[in-house]
Amino acid sequence: MMKSEHTKHEEDYTGYLLSEQKRTDLHYHNWRCRETIERLTGEWELIGKYHERLWFQRAFRMSQDELLERYRELAYHLTWAEKDIETNNWALYMHGVAVEQLHKDMTPFDKLDMTQHRLVQKNLFD
C-alpha cells in the first residue's frame, strides 16, 4: 500500500527509538570525537601551513612527503570524527522526533470504564 492511499499521512518513527544506554553511548562517543578533533586539529593546521619549510621538517624529523602523508592521515581521522558526530546527532534528533510522535499518538484512557471489561486469567502451561 502506498502512502498516498493512507487516510492519515503518518510515518512510523518507532525504528528511531533508542534505549537510555544507547543514547548515553552516543553522547559519550560524540564527546570522544570532539576530544579527538580538538587534539588533532592543531597538528593538522601546523603541517598544512609549514610542511614545505625545512626547519619544520627538521623539527618533526620527517621529509616533506612523510609530512604530507601525516597530513592526509590526520584529515582522514578528523573527517571520520566529524561524520560520526553528525550521524550520532541525527540518531539523537530522530529519537526525539519519535518520542514526540509517540506522545502525540497516545490516546487518553480517561473514558475507559474497567467495570465493563472482564479479565480472564489463563493457565501458564496448557
Image (cartoon, rainbow, N blue to C red):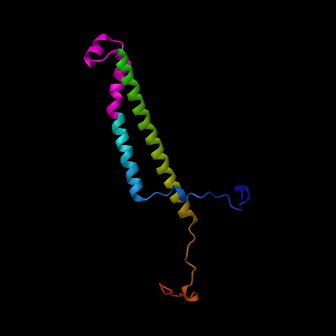
Which quadrant: the N terminus? bottom right
Q: Is residue 117 left or right of residue 41?
A: right
* The residue positioned farthest toward the front in the image shown: 126
Residue 29, magenta (yes or no): no
Residue 47, magenta (yes or no): yes
The residue at the point 58 percent across, 88 percent down is 116
Q: Is residue 72 above or below residue 105?
A: above
The residue at the point 53 percent across, 55 percent down is 97
Q: Which quadrant of the structure image shows residue 59?
A: top left
Q: Position of residue 76 (x, y in %)?
A: 42, 31
The residue at the point 57 percent across, 87 percent down is 117
Magenta stretch: dominant SS?
A: helix
Q: Position of residue 15 (x, y in %)?
A: 54, 57
Q: Is residue 24 left or right of residue 126?
A: left
Along the line of sight, the residue nearer the viewer: 66 or 21: 66
* The residue positioned farthest toward the right in the image shown: 5
Please give the range of residues in magenta.
Answer: 38-63
Q: Position of residue 6 (x, y in %)?
A: 71, 60
